[in-house]
Amino acid sequence: MSDEELQATYRKAKALILPSEIEGFGLPALEAYYLGTPVCFVRGTSVEEVLSVATAKGGMSLDNPESQIAALDEVLAMDPGEIRDCGLKLRKVYSLKTVSERMLTVFQEVSREFS
């Protein structure tokens, strides 16, 4: 799937359901919100941590079907402005510039410790 096709798919989707307990960073969740699609995610994962700067909505448990239904209902009830605001907050926190600056700071601190 090309980047253009992926973006079109995210934009057409009503929600992204991300039932992973081992997602490394949560890039699919960021991509979805950037493109206006809310996300259902597993509580207690890195995805929850990544999204927590913008929303607590959409959290679910894999062993509880009722929580999965509730999570989907919750994100489907979000209005477009709320979804857009989540995407904007996430872009601000996880922009390439912001993440690069934080990584550089960490590298500099580690370098000073070992110098």
Image (cartoon, rainbow, N blue to C red):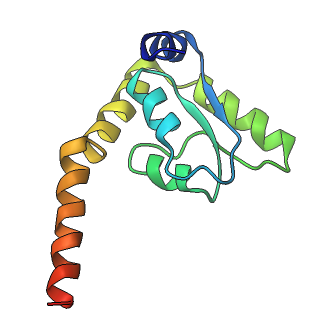
From the viewer's perspective, tell me whether residue 17 is left or right of residue 57.
Answer: right
Residue 26 drawn at (x, y percent): 51, 45
Point out the residue furthest to the front here: 115
Residue at image location 36% in from the left, 31% down from the top: 87
Which of the two residues, 29 or 61, is positioned nearer the viewer here? 29
Examine the rendered structure and indicate whether residue 68 appears above or below residue 76: below
Which of the two residues, 71 or 8, is positioned nearer the viewer here? 8
Q: Quadrant of the C terminus?
A: bottom left
Examine the rendered structure and indicate whether residue 106 appears above or below residue 61: below
Residue 46 drawn at (x, y percent): 54, 56
Residue at image location 59% in from the left, 29% down from the top: 75
From the viewer's perspective, tell me whether residue 76 is left or right of residue 101.
Answer: right
Residue at image location 54% in from the left, 9% down from the top: 12
Residue 70 drawn at (x, y percent): 73, 36
Residue 79 drawn at (x, y percent): 47, 20
Which of the two residues, 113 or 15, is positioned nearer the viewer here? 113
Count of numbered badges drawn on the protein: 0
From the viewer's perspective, tell me whether residue 107 is left or right of residue 20.
Answer: left
Examine the rendered structure and indicate whether residue 42 appears above or below residue 27: below
Examine the rendered structure and indicate whether residue 52 appears above or below residue 91: below
Q: Quadrant of the N terminus?
A: top right
From the viewer's perspective, tell me whether residue 28 is left or right of residue 106.
Answer: right
Residue at image location 14% in from the left, 85% down from the top: 112
